[in-house]
Amino acid sequence: MTQAEIKLCSLLLQEHFGEIVEKIGVHLIRTGSQPLRVIAHDTGTSLDQVKKALCVLIQHNLVIYQVHKRGVVEYEAQCSRVLRMLRYPRYIYTAKTLYSDTGELIVEELLLNGKMTMSAVVKKVADRLTETMEDGKTMDYSEVSNTFVRLADTHFVQRCPWVPVTENSDPGPPPPAPILVISEKDMYLVPKLSLIGKGKRRRSSDEDAAGEPKAKRPKHGTDNKEPIPDDGIYWQANLDRFHQHFRDQAIVSAVANRMDQTSSEIVRTMLRMSEITTPSTAPFTQPLSSNEIFRSLPVGYNISKQVLDQYLTLLADDPLEFVGKSGDSGGGMYVINLHKALGSLATATLESVVQERFGSRCARIFRLVLQKKHLEQKQVEDFAMIPAKEAKDMLYKMLSENFISLQVGCQ
C-alpha cells in the first residue's frame, strides 16, 4: 500500500472515529495482522482503549480477526474497505434515487452504524422521517419496513454473519473468539416482524406540555423493556451490490452513446433481470431468451417482438460485443459480456485521457498500439499517417509518461 493511501486511510479514520481508532487502524494497516497485546504495546495504548477501538473497527467491517492454531487471535485491517468510505455519499444517493428518501435513510443509518437490527433501523428511520413532516403527520413503521424488504430483495442490504447456537453440553473451554457463519440462502432472508407504530418527534417534553396525556409515559417505558423481536439478526449495507449497480449503469450509458436509447433500454432490462442471479465477478450474465426479455421490458415501452429481435441481432453483431448470443432456443439466448464491456469502457477512458493530455494525434497512435499490441516506429508512422518527426516526438511523450512501453526485439 502506498504512503498516499495510508495517509488517506488515516484521515478517513480520524474524521469518522477519532484519534484513538485512527491510531490503532493505521498501525494495523502498516504492520499487518497482530494480536491484541502487541497492538497495545506497539502503539502505547491501554488494553481497554485498544479493545474499544477494535470493537468500533470490527463493527464497521474495517478490521477482521482470525484464530490461529495456538489459540492466538490476530486482527487485520481491511484497507480497501477503509478507502470505500469515500464512496458513502454515492451509496446513499443511489439508494435515494432507487428507493426515495426512505431507502436513503436506511442505507445511511447502516453505513453510519456498521451493523444494526432491522427493527432498530425501521424505528430510527421512521423517527427521522417524522421530524421532516408537517405537524400532525407521522411515518408508519410498516412503510419503512416495506422499503427495507425491497432493499434486501435486491441485495442492497444483507445479513451479517452470526454465532451459531450450540448446545451447552460441550464441557470444553469456549473458543478464544467467536466463529461467525452464514449460509448464502439466509443472507437476504428478512425476518417476519410485525412492527406496529409510528415515528416519534424528538420534542416529546414539549408535546407533553401541549396537552399529551401523561398516561402514555408508563406505556413507553414498558415498551422499552420488551425483548427485541429480531435480536441477534444484524444487517449491513452490501457495498459490492452498489458497485455492481454502478457497473451496470456505466454499461447502459455506453450502449446509449454508441447506439440509441432503445438499445440501452434493452440492455438495462437484461441487466435488471440478471442482477440477483449473476455474481458480481461473473464474466457473463445468465442467458436470457428473447421471449423473456420481451416480457420484461418496461410497461409502456411500445416495440414489437420483431423489432426487439432486430435490436438484439444488432447488439450481438456490434464489434464491441457488449451483448453475445449463446443459443437459439426461446427465440434466441443472449448474455451481457460483462468483462468485455468493462474492458471497452476502460479502454475508452484511457483514450480520452491521452487525447486530453497530448491531443488527437497522440490518441490516434495510442489507439493503434492498443489494437495492434506491438508496433515499430515506422509502422506507427504509416498506419497513423503522421510525419516521422511528429510521430517520434509523440511516442517519446507517451513513453516518458508511461502510457506506452518500449520493447527491444531480439535479432
Image (cartoon, helix red, strand yellow):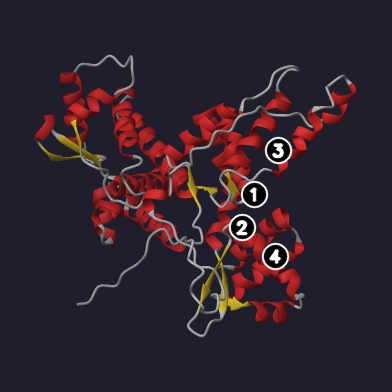
Which of the 4 image quarters holds residue 78? bottom right
| Disc 3: which residue | 223
Using residue 350 as the reference point, say whether residue 97 is left or right of it: right
Query: Label 3 to label 4, Cα distance in Å?
Result: 32 Å
| Disc 2: which residue | 59
Image quadrant containing the C terminus: bottom left
Image quadrant containing the N terminus: bottom right
Outermost residue to the left? 328
Dot in front, 3 or 4: 3
Q: Residue at x 37, y 49 (%)?
A: 185
Q: In the image shown, does 39 or 30 lie closer to the viewer?
A: 39
Q: In the image shown, does 324 or 215 lie closer to the viewer?
A: 215
Q: Secondary structure at mark 3?
A: helix
| Disc 1: which residue | 113
Estimate how packed mark 1 is, as few (under 14), some (14 to 19) or many (20 or more) residues with alpha carbons within 10 Å.
Answer: some
Q: Amino acid at mark 3?
A: Asp
Report if the CB atoms under discs 2 and 1 are less than 8 Å apart.
yes
